[in-house]
Image: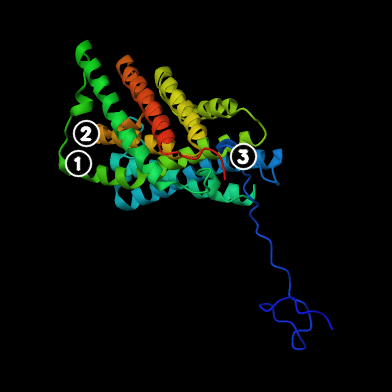
Amino acid sequence: MQENPGPHLPYGPQYPYPPAPPSRSWFLPTPRGVSFDHLARTGAARPWRAIVGTIAVAAAFFVVAAVVLGAGAVVATLLGISAQLDPTGDLFGDPVFGLVVMLLAIAAVLPFVFGAAALLQRRRPGTLSSVAGRLRWSWLASCAGLALLALAIGQTVQLLALMVSGEDYSNMIGWVGWGSFLPALIVIVLLVPFQSAAEEYIFRGWFLQAVGTHIRNPVWSILIGAALFASLHGYSWAGLAEVFVFGAVMGWLAVRTGGLEAAIALHVMNNMVAFGLSAAAGELQDAMRQSTVEVSWQSLAGVVVQFGLYAFGVLYLAKKRSISTISA
């Protein structure tokens, strides 16, 4: 007579066959003692997985955008918004509705990024967030406070530079009234965090880790990811330089702090303030026309101060709070 395999596993005359072994998890173990950019180095790490996954994420980015824009056109027609098409070439005449469509077109890609990590790389989607396998909310909140402080100082520097040089700064302090500002504010508060997070998960999460699976030095994945991030913006050369530096700094902070929290916090605050100031001044439509946005040297001065203070503050606070930078 065979031995009973254990008190919790029924086995006997009424159970003539041994119990089946427990099924293995689809997700492979997260590698221990590695930095954020190496979290995809699981037992299933193969070049084709990173390549196919990157192509899939890129395809999802454009397909989802097309679907959301198409759905937006249908909704606009039903609401009568399409009759107000702007002759300058804007997709929708209502800037608030246009902002909703634009933000949703990016935010909706986020589930596909998580799906690529889970299905193609067989790792837990939480590893896209940090070395802890999840988003560290308390650390994110601390970074958001630092981002707001650095942004306020940077905006002040920019405003002072504009005033001293005699340039127009009405778009920074204009006021259109609560009737026009409140709907835009609601959209900004509800959707910008998801849009900003989606971009960080794509470029500083998926891409940085996909390249980091097979490249030891994170510099290449940071710089290439920043270049790709900048290429999707339609600014002038100065604006593209600013976006590239932003992407590079955020990628560097992701590696140095072991997660996306610092990058998400600054990205969210930047976009909320940028859209909020434009909406308050009644220039939201102009803010969404990236090709017409001119980035002045005064703006670049404010950005340099902002990024420098933020990076220093994040690294200082991460060290003080002993934020983990490698997986346990």
177 or 70, which is in the foreground? 177
Quarter of the N terminus within the rendering: bottom right
> Which amino acid lies under the numbered mark 2 shown in the image of this protein?
Gly
Q: Residue at x 67, y 34 (%)?
A: 214
Up the image or down, 266 lies above or below 70; here it is above
Is tag 3's residue or tag 2's residue first in the polypeptide sequence?
Answer: 3
Q: Which residue is mark 1?
A: 180
Q: Position of residue 172 (x, y in %)?
A: 22, 27
Count every numbered label the image shows and give the total. 3
Q: Which residue is mark 2?
A: 282
Question: Could you say whether the residue bearing mark 1 is in a helix, strand or loop?
Answer: helix
211 or 127, which is in the foreground? 127
Q: How far apart are labels 1 and 2 at the CA level?
A: 8 Å
Q: How far apart are labels 3 and 1 at the CA level?
A: 40 Å
Q: How far apart are labels 3 and 2 at the CA level?
A: 39 Å
Residue 293 as seen in the image, left or right of residue 234: left
Q: Picture quarter containing residue 153? A: top left
Residue 180 as seen in the image, left or right of residue 189: left
Q: Which residue is mark 3?
A: 55
- Can the viewer see residue 94 in this picture? no
Q: Position of residue 108 (x, y in %)?
A: 46, 47
Crowd tier of the residue under label 1, counting other residues whose Cα lies within 10 Å: few below 14, some 14–19, many 20 or above: some
Q: Position of residue 86 (x, y in %)?
A: 31, 35
> Which amino acid lies under the numbered mark 1 shown in the image of this protein?
Ser
Q: Picture quarter containing residue 160? A: top left
Question: Could you say whether the residue bearing mark 2 is in a helix, strand or loop?
Answer: loop
> Which amino acid lies under the numbered mark 3 shown in the image of this protein?
Ile
Q: Position of residue 328 (x, y in %)?
A: 57, 45
Up the image or down, 325 lies above or below 168; here it is below
